[in-house]
Image (cartoon, rainbow, N blue to C red):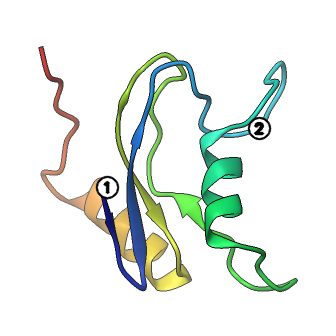
Amino acid sequence: LHEDQHILVCAKPGGLAMHPGSGITGATLVDEVRAYLGEVPEGEFKPAPAHRLDRETSGVVIVAKTRQAIVRLSEIFTESDARKTYLT
């Protein structure tokens, strides 16, 4: 939906897990984003979602591409009026 040097905003379909983990098989949003953005050198920041959606929930996810972005997005989500909204 949007991409710049710091963030990637994408639409997550329902049924796609955010992260690999216990009992998760197949691709995840993190896997797909990292494949799209390419390999990151060892020791460098790896792109990461700034928030989560449940596996079965579809919606917009903001992925930080830089350490500065993840720090700022974390501040926004924890210290402001930012909140999830649901479409009906």
Residue 16 percent across, percent down from the top left: 58, 27
Of discs 2 and 1, which sits in the foreground? 2
Q: Residue 29: horizontal and vertical position, in percent?
A: 60, 43
Quarter of the rendering occupied by the C terminus = top left
**Res 40 quadrant in image:** bottom right
Res 39 label: none
Mark 2: amino acid: Pro
Q: Residue at x 52, y 75 (%)?
A: 65
Q: Residue sitting at 18 percent across and 24 percent down?
A: 86
Q: Quadrant of residue 55?
A: top right
Q: Residues within 10 Å of mark 2 (few under 14, many from 20)?
A: some
Q: Is residue 83 above or below residue 71?
A: above
| SS at badge 1 | helix
Q: Residue at x 19, y 42 (%)?
A: 83
- Amino acid, disc 1: Thr
Foreground residue among 6 and 50? 6
Q: Which secondary structure lies at badge 2?
A: loop
Q: Residue at x 38, y 26 (%)?
A: 58
- On the image, numbered disc 1 is attached to which residue? 78
Looking at the picture, does residue 11 appear above or below residue 16?
below
Q: Is residue 1 left or right of residue 6?
A: left
Relative side of 76 to 34, left or right = left
Mark 2 or mark 1: whose residue is earlier in sequence: 2
Q: Label 2, label 1: how many angstroms apart (C-alpha)?
A: 24 Å
Residue 20: mark in rendering: 2
Q: Residues within 10 Å of mark 1 (few under 14, many from 20)?
A: few
